Amino acid sequence: MKIALLGYGKMGKTIEAIALSRGHEIVIKTSEALNSEITAADIAIDFSIPEAAFTNISNCINHNIPVISGTTGWLDNYNKIVSLCEEKKGAFIYASNFSLGVNIFFELNKTLAKMMSSLKDYNVDIEEIHHTQKLDAPSGTAISLAEDIIENHNNFTSWKLDGNKDNVLPITAKRIENVPGTHNITYKSEVDTIEINHIAHNRQGFALGAVIAAEWLHGKTGVYTMKDVLNIG
Ligand SMILES: NC(=O)c1ccc[n+]([C@@H]2O[C@H](COP(=O)([O-])OP(=O)(O)OC[C@H]3O[C@@H](n4cnc5c(N)ncnc54)[C@H](O)[C@@H]3O)[C@@H](O)[C@H]2O)c1
Ligand SMILES: O=C(O)C1=N[C@H](C(=O)O)CCC1
C-alpha cells in the first residue's frame, strides 16, 4: 500500500520502519499540517498531536482516503468523525492503543472488573506512566481502561485524574524519562492486593498494530475498532 504518515515523530518513524519491512511504500510524511494533496496515498496513518488529529482525519475522509488514528487527547470530537465517515462512506479506525498485548489486557481488565464488582472491600485505581514529552494526561489507554471498568463494575459512574471521591475511579499519571507506556490496575483491600499490568518495552508493538490495522482497513468502508481487526474479546 502507499501510506501517508500524518505525524512523523517517535511513532511515525517507528511505523515507517515496520511498514517498509512489510513491503509498503511511504508516499507522504509530514510533521505539520498537510499542504499537499493526500490523494497520492491508499491509506493514511495519523500519529500527530491532540490539536491536529481532528483536521487530519477529516481531511482524509473528505478526500476518500481510509485513515487510522492513534493520536490521543482529541476524543471530544470522535462522534463528529463517526458522522462524517458515515456521510462520506469513508473508512476509519481509532485506537487509544494499537498493541496486541494491550488489546488482550483490555479484555482481562473487563473480566476482572466484572469479578470484583460485588466485592466492596476493595479500592480500585489506575496508574499510567509515560515519557516526559507526552502532551496529554491521563493517557488514552488509561481512559479506555477506566471506561471499561465503569461499564463492568457497579461502583463507578465516572473517572477523574487524581480523583478521591466515592463512585469516581481515580487515575494517576506519572511522567518519567524514556518510559514507552506502563498501565497498572490495582484492587486493594485490608487483607490483600490484586494487580494487573501492561508494560510496553518499546514502541514496536504500537506501530505493528497500527500497520496491521491499516492493512485490514484497506478496501473496507465503515468505522471499526481494534476488536474488529484482532477478532478478540
Ligand atoms: N494509539 C497508540 O497505540 C499510541 C501509541 C503511542 C503514541 N500514541 C499517540 O500518538 C501521538 C504521537 O505520539 P509520538 O510519541 O509519536 O509523539 P511525537 O511528539 O514524537 O510526534 C508527533 C509529531 O506530530 C507532528 N505534528 C504536529 N502538528 C502536526 C500536524 N498538524 N499534522 C501532522 N503532524 C503534526 C509533530 O511535529 C511531531 O513530529 C500522541 O498523541 C500519542 O499519545 C498512540
Ligand atoms: O507515548 C505515548 O504518548 C503513548 N500514548 C498512548 C496513550 O495515550 O495511551 C499509548 C501508549 C503510548
Image (cartoon, rainbow, N blue to C red):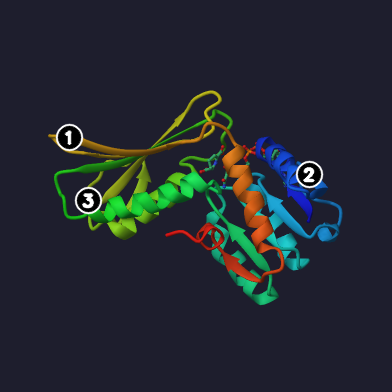
Examine the rendering and report whether any part of residue 162 can be seen.
no
Is disc 3 in contact with disc 2, using a CB cutoff of under 8 Å?
Answer: no
Residue under numbered circle 3: 116
Identify the residue at horizontal 55%, vertical 53% (top origin): 95
Q: In 3D space, how far apart are the residues under numbered discs 3 and 2 (Cα atoms)?
A: 45 Å
Residue under numbered circle 1: 192
Identify the residue at horizontal 78%, vertical 50% (top origin): 24
Q: In 3D space, how far apart are the residues under numbered discs 3 and 1 (Cα atoms)?
A: 13 Å
Establish whether ligand 2 lies closer than 8 Å to the Cβ of label 3.
no
What SS does tag 3 mark? Answer: helix
N-terminal label among 3 and 1 = 3
Q: Is residue 91 left or right of residue 41?
A: left
The foreground one among 14 and 60 is: 14
Residue under numbered circle 2: 30
Q: Which of the two discs, 1 and 2, sits closer to the camera?
A: 1
Q: Is residue 169 left or right of residue 145?
A: left
- In the displayed structure, would residue 20 be above or below residue 232? above
Q: In 3D space, how far apart are the residues under numbered discs 1 and 2 (Cα atoms)?
A: 49 Å
Q: Position of residue 229 (x, y in %)?
A: 56, 60
Residue count near mark 3 (Cα–Cα under 10 Å), binned few <14, some 14–19, many ≥20: many
Amino acid found under the numbered disc labelled 3: Met
Residue count near mark 1 (Cα–Cα under 10 Å), binned few <14, some 14–19, many ≥20: few
Residue count near mark 2 (Cα–Cα under 10 Å), binned few <14, some 14–19, many ≥20: some
Quarter holding ligand 2:
top right
Identify the residue at horizontal 63%, vertical 43% (top origin): 207
Q: Position of residue 94 (x, y in %)?
A: 58, 57
Quarter location, residue 41: bottom right
Q: Position of residue 156 (x, y in %)?
A: 27, 54
What SS does tag 1 mark? Answer: loop
Q: Is residue 71 left or right of residue 168?
A: right
> How many callouts does the rendering have?
3
